[in-house]
Image: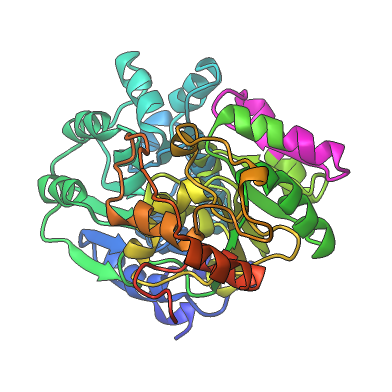
Amino acid sequence: MAFSDLGLVPEILRAVVECGYTEPTPVQAQVIPVALTGCDVMAGAQTGTGKTAGFTLPMLSRLAPFATTSPSPARHPVRALILTPTRELAMQVEESVHTYGKYLPLRTTVVYGGVNMNAQIAILRNGVDILVATPGRLLDHVQNKTVNLSMVQMLILDEADRMLDMGFMPDLRRIIALLPAQRQNMMFSATFSGEIKKLADSMMNAPQLIEVARRNTAAETVRQVVLPVHKERKHALLTHLIKTRQLRQVLVFCGTKLGANRLAQHLSRDGIPANAIHGDKTQQARVEALDQFKQGVIQVLVATDVAARGIDIDQLPCVVNYDMPHAAEDYVHRIGRTGRAGASGEAWSLVSVDELRYLADIERLLGAKIPTEIIPGFEPELGAMPEPARARQPRFDPSKQAAGASTPVSGAAAREALMASPPTRRERVDIEVPDTPPALRAQAAATPVRKQVAALFRPPGNAGN
């Protein structure tokens, strides 16, 4: 199937061809024809599948009859509203609207928080056909009466699951209540939770459900691998990987803003140009860092989950989970930054024993085990235990251990104890791991280090495989 077979208006097809696209992705091929009919659409598609064009192209095509060069603001009411969870994603979506709508005289703008409202107000007063917005800033404009949503014909929610995770549900319901009852709705989400379904039921009219990939799955074009490592050696391992594998672009995820700053500084001292983006950085600083990353000025971009939403980089070769996400769904979003639109990519997860419970959650979500690779020289400490539990254990004294014996706790036992009753996200790990019998210690001492380390990341019950 070609784009010319989908029913798009000539102006849109011309822009698509100029971008070098000839065939739609699976999500585009399924969503565009349905959206062009005016039906509501609820689409489940993983990141990197071309879903932005999946809603942008039919939206522009349906608004084409209203396109006018008239300077009157009254001739340019907000007819299409696109809501996204973050500023970065909002800017990315608006860029796509400009790219594909370049031959249509439709006015587009984006509004988001963290910047002065005056410039946004001036543009809105001149009339806007398509408005891309984050929920919070849109409600600011509503409160200040600087935007009118009474003429909206199309509402698009992008990454609805993420908006739910970020606590935007009350804002979404307030916004939806301001819109005309007769409109087309499109919702795009990588996952479908019960709350997302409730939202869809409350705002949509007999939506067409389109699922391109199995729910909660990672992109098939991404090669995933778990790299076991002691938590104190993660930085050294990351530096080793970047230098030895000569990676030109690496997006690294950290769990905290402070951790992202520190890692970027450490990498820079190692001779690897790096910068960090997170919620405490100004919008200008975040945009500049992202531009530097896209242009190759910096080699590594270290990001927190929220800051990385909307990052879309062609042919990004590698994503690294420096800290494992505490929510399994975030793993899918993270690694979806690579392997986009059919391109191949790699996702490395640096996993310490403290993070085994998060790895287990991710593997349960994916329905598959992620392959493990041991990097020589960076094998994790044998018998390593979760940090809170380790503090309660007596410090190991080599003088009290038989010559040549292994550490007191085997990796397999540690994982088994961790996996027996995984704690919730907010619980502290409080696990007592019994000492390994002397006979097993002797056996461990005679086992190659690589096999001992691999046992740490082997599922319980498969120790002999």
Residue at screen point 37% across, 59% down: 416
- How many numbered markers are drawn? 0
Question: Is 11 placed above or below 414 here?
Answer: below
Magenta segment includes 349? no
| Res 178 quadrant in image | top left
Q: Position of residue 244 (x, y in %)?
A: 83, 63
Q: Position of residue 446 (x, y in %)?
A: 63, 72
Residue at screen point 67% across, 30% down: 261
- The magenta-colored residue range is 264-289
Residue at screen point 83% across, 43% down: 273
Relative side of 75 to 354, left or right = left
| Res 283 quadrant in image | top right
Residue placed farthest to the bottom in the image?
1
Relative side of 299 to 410, left or right = right
Residue 12 seen by the camera: no
| Res 360 quadrant in image | bottom left
Q: Nearer the viewer, residue 317 or 95?
A: 317
Residue 35 seen by the camera: yes
Check the picture and name the quadrant holding the C terminus: bottom left
Q: Nearer the viewer, residue 153 or 187?
A: 187
